[in-house]
Structures are given as C-alpha cells and as structure tokens.
C-alpha cells in the first residue's frame, strides 16, 4: 500500500499571503489529522477530519482551516500568513471510527514565511 | 489535556551501546506510539503499544498503562539510529482523536 503523501514538500511564501497544503491518506483510511512542528513549540495538533467532518480542533487561530473530501483526501489552508507560521506541517492518517488506532504520517510540507 | 514527558532530552552513545528512553504520561490512554523522526522530518512508526511489550529487531518497547509510562529499548546502537525519538499518546473518545507528543529524546550515536 502506498503511504501518506503530502504536497507540496516545500513552500516559500511572504507575510500576508495564504497557502493550501494537501494530504492524501493511506487507501482505506478515513481519518486525517494535521500537526504543526516548530522548534519552539514542538509537535502540536491542528485538527482532525473523519468522513468529511471536522471532529476535533487544537488551539490554533481561525486563520488555520481545513477540509476533507469524499475520497478522504484533505487540505489545510492558512490565511494571512505570519512569520511564526513557518513550520513543518505533518498530516497523519488512520482508520478512524471507533477503532481509531495507529496513525501513519506523511513526509511533511516545510513552509517558510518571509 | 494529557501531559507527556520524555527523558532524557539528549543522549550521546558510542556505537554498539544499549539505551533506554522513557515516556511518562499524566492520564489513562489507549493509544501510545513511538516514532523516529528522520533528518528530513518524516515520522517513522516504530511501535503502536498502548500496553504490553513488543519487539522488532534491535528495538523493543514496553508500556505499563496502569503506571502511565512506556520504555523504548535500543540495543547494539548503530549510527543510523541517530535522530529524535518521540512518544505520542492519545485517548480514543469519539470526537477527541488526537495524539499528544512529548518533546522528544535526541539520540546521537558516535562511530
């Protein structure tokens, strides 16, 4: 089975712009979660989607949003970028449902905001 | 929320040595995973171990859920074992599926 894929792998934006990141889960997985990793804050949970519905959200401002499509692929969007949004963004997929279980991560998108 | 503490924060060992990494968590969990983050940032799954003991080659892990800790053992270390090891925990509660990560243990293996 193919693993979790994320596109693009690298991205450079300037302050004030917006960005969209994409994540394709492992085939058959219905849950997709997003995490932000920075040197200062470590790995932090952004949100989780299951069957096109956001089930859980972390403590991030409303500039961070996401969605999930009927094929379980997910996108996250960050509007009005700030310098502090520079980070590695990781998505993870799992079976979801009541058997939430093991999560598998993609290679990440490294975002640099100038 | 659940607090996760990993120790030690840094570990430098000679090739061939053994090591034990520890993960303490503050509440009951039913999901616990160990990851190795490679230099390019990808999190590699090592173990899914909410309880019990598992082994995979030179690596093994034990989780004592009742005492809220997990241990990762690496035997006969190789330079390729270098990197950051993360413990992540979660509690399945429909609508609350998220992993909380520790701050990691940075392992450096010297040839």
Image: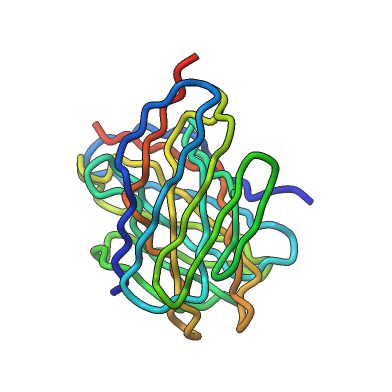
Q: Using the rendered view, name the quadrant where residue A11 is placed.
A: top left
- Of residues A61 and B70, the one nearer the viewer is B70
Location of residue B76 with respect to B96 vertically, above or below? above
Q: Position of residue A31 (x, y in %)?
A: 58, 69
Residue A25 falls in image quadrant: bottom right
Front-most of residues B62 and A91:
B62
Q: Position of residue B77 (x, y in %)?
A: 55, 29
In the rendered view, tell whether residue B55 sits above or below residue B108: below
- The total of numbered circles placed on residues is 0
Q: Residue at x 46, y 60 (%)?
A: B70
B77 or A88: which is nearer to us? B77
Indicate the quadrant where residue A79 lies: bottom left
Residue at the image point whose x is 52% and y is 40% from the top: B42
Of A100 and A110, nearer the camera is: A100
> Farthest residue toward the front?
B17
Q: Position of residue B82 (x, y in %)?
A: 48, 29
The C terminus of chain A - image quarter: top left
Q: Residue A47, image x and y in percent?
A: 41, 67
Work out whether B32 lies above or below A86: below
């Amino acid at each position: 089975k193919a693993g979790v894929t994320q596109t693009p792998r690298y991205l450079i934006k300037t302050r004030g712009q917006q960005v969209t990141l994409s994540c394709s889960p492992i085939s058959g997985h219905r849950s997709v979660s997003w995490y932000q990793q920075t040197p200062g804050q470590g790995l932090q949970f952004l949100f989780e989607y299951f069957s096109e519905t956001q089930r859980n959200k972390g403590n991030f401002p409303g500039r961070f949003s996401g969605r999930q499509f009927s094929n379980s692929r997910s996108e996250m969007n960050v509007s009005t970028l700030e310098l502090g949004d520079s980070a590695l963004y990781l998505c993870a997929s799992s079976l979801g449902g009541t058997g939430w279980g093991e999560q598998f991560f993609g290679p990440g998108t490294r975002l640099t905001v100038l | 929320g659940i607090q996760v503490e990993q120790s030690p924060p840094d570990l430098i060992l000679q090739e061939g040595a053994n090591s034990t990494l520890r993960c303490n968590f503050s509440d009951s969990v039913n999901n616990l995973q160990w990851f190795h983050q490679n230099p390019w940032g990808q999190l590699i799954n090592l173990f899914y171990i909410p309880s019990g003991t598992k082994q995979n080659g030179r690596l093994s892990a034990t989780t004592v859920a009742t005492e809220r800790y997990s241990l990762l053992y690496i035997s006969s270390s190789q330079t390729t074992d270098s990197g950051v090891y993360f413990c992540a925990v979660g509690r399945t509660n429909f609508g609350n599926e998220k992993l909380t990560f520790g701050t990691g243990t940075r392992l450096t293996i010297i040839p």
